[in-house]
Image: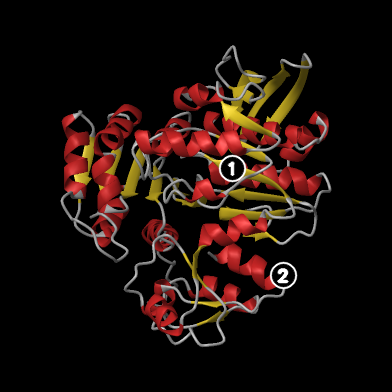
């Protein structure tokens, strides 16, 4: 919601809003930044909705019982979903829409960065903070808009982009039978072309519906146009040869974000920029300067040989990608995973357990507090204890702890030099604060006491 509000404010709209986290006093620095852009903040009690309000824009998580919604109903003020307003921004611009159940935030950041460096001055609307811009948005004035689109609430169906990018189709918020038609329509409606991950079986199947699909692969898929070859991983990222099967061109690429999944993300962005008409050498040069996305394997700090990492992974694919990347380096993992939402956790239970069981080593430790509950109606028929039990039965160390505080105490008391502490989960800004607090506590216990001078 913040990127959308910021862009509308930059375009001259009078914008205000509410957030339950603001009422709870959480992350005050984030809300101070929002206010610095001229966006007014109100308590979520309906007081911000007046007869002067033209439209109330809500996220898909907002319930009908929220006082702001009730106030809008009383005043006869139209209520629009966030995605409706974002889709309107595509009107009059050339649009690149990034879709898929994993990786779309990074691909949006990469694609937007490339277009910016190559001089198109794009509008960028992203679901995470892009380190190159220190924001989740960019208020450009050029003819392009690059935006992350969401399948979790079905709102991806509102977009008719020039270029559609499809990363993958895996379990997250919806079962696969519901996702397939959403993504099919998404790629079919794209006016200038679709960029599709041929390594993902579901996405590759849909690619057959478009004869002009630009496929990409890190696994030498025969139907892919862009291939990553001769991959070499290094401490800061990777290097690889990019083969364009259509032109027979091979170019060396260097990426400064880690993991095989980010090479795949880079190919998606390379494909989108290629369809946007940017020369391949310019695209590759721009990509070298991409710094990453906040909370994507973000190193919070290191103290006493213990590294604390903050990561957004929350579905099976993201978790597997994060852990696989971390396992490329030595050191035990102490992983705190904060499950989010009772419904999604029940739907993904088996796949989540399999991701942890397959990627964790025997000496790694998985810790889970109870499932995060953000409000609203939910059937609480699953617990984090069920998830940790599944992983433990698969032979890995996994422990349920009723509170986040208990998890923090365990980490601080058990972490030792060489360990990586990973704070993992989504849609909760306080996880980053928790990671920072873990680092602070580790620093406190690992720092030697000050030397005492002899009294006179």
Is residue 235 among the parts visible in the rendering? no
44 on left or right of 41: left
Disc 1 from disc 2: Cα separation: 23 Å
Instruction: Decide: is 22 above or below 268.
Output: below
Instruction: Decide: is 49 above or below 397.
Output: below
* Helix, strand or loop for disc 1: strand
228 on left or right of 427: right
370, 88: nearer the viewer: 88
Of callouts 1 and 2, the N-terminal one: 2
* Helix, strand or loop for disc 2: loop
Residue 58: image location, x then y, percent: 47, 67
Q: In the rendered image, which residue does mark 2 sit on?
A: 11
Q: Residues within 10 Å of mark 1 (few under 14, many from 20)?
A: many
The residue drawn where x is 57% and y is 78% is: 54
- Circles 1 and 2: CB distance less than 8 Å? no
Q: In the rendered image, which residue does mark 1 sit on?
A: 98
Q: Quadrant of residue 358?
A: top left
The residue drawn where x is 49% and y is 32% is: 168
Q: Residue furthest front?
A: 76
Residue 224 shows which numbered tag? Answer: none
Residue 333: image location, x then y, percent: 36, 39
Q: Quadrant of residue 89?
A: bottom right
Q: Report the label total.
A: 2
Instruction: Decide: is 327 above or below 309.
Output: above
442, 138: nearer the viewer: 138
399, 196: nearer the viewer: 196
Instruction: Decide: is 387 above or below 76.
Output: above
Which color mode does the image show?
secondary structure
Residue 156: image location, x then y, percent: 51, 47
């Amino acid at each position: 919601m913040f990127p959308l509000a910021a862009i509308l404010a930059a375009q001259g709209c009078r914008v205000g809003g509410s957030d339950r986290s603001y009422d709870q006093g959480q992350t005050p620095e984030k809300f101070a930044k929002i206010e610095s852009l001229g966006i007014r903040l109100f308590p979520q009690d309906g007081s911000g909705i007046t007869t002067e309000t033209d439209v109330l824009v809500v996220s898909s998580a907002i319930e009908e019982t929220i006082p702001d919604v009730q106030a809008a109903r009383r005043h006869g003020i139209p209520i629009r979903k966030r995605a409706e307003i974002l889709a309107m921004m595509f009107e009059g611009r050339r649009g690149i829409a990034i879709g898929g159940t994993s990786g779309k935030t990074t691909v949006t950041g990469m694609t937007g960065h490339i277009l910016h460096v190559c001089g198109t001055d794009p509008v960028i609307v992203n679901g995470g903070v892009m380190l190159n811009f220190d924001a989740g948005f960019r208020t450009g004035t050029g003819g392009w808009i690059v935006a992350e689109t969401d399948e979790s609430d079905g709102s991806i169906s509102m977009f008719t982009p020039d270029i559609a990018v499809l990363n993958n189709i895996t379990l997250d918020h919806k079962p696969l039978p519901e996702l397939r038609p959403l993504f099919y329509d998404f790629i079919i409606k794209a006016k200038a072309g679709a960029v599709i991950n041929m390594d993902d079986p579901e996405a590759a199947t849909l690619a057959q519906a478009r004869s002009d699909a630009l496929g990409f692969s890190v696994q030498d898929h025969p139907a892919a146009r862009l291939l990553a070859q001769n991959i070499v991983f290094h401490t800061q990222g990777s290097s690889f040869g990019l083969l364009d099967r259509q032109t027979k061109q091979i170019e060396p690429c260097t990426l400064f974000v880690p993991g095989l999944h980010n090479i795949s993300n880079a190919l998606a962005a390379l494909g989108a920029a290629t369809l946007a008409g940017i020369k391949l050498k310019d695209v590759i040069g721009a990509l070298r300067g991409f710094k990453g996305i906040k909370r994507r394997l973000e190193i919070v700090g290191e103290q006493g040989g213990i590294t604390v990492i903050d990561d957004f992974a929350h579905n099976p694919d993201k978790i597997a990608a994060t852990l696989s990347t971390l396992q490329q380096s030595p050191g035990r993992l102490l992983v705190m995973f904060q499950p989010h939402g009772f419904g999604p956790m029940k739907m993904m239970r088996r796949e989540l357990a399999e991701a942890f069981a397959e990627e964790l080593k025997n000496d790694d430790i998985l810790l889970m507090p109870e499932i995060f509950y953000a409000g609203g109606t939910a059937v609480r028929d699953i617990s984090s204890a069920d998830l940790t039990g599944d992983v433990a039965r698969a032979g890995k160390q996994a422990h349920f702890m009723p509170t986040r505080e208990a998890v923090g105490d365990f980490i601080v008391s058990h972490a030792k030099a060489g360990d990586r502490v990973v704070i993992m989960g989504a849609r909760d800004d306080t996880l980053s604060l928790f990671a920072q607090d873990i680092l602070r506590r580790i620093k406190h216990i690992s720092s030697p006491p000050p030397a005492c001078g002899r009294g006179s």
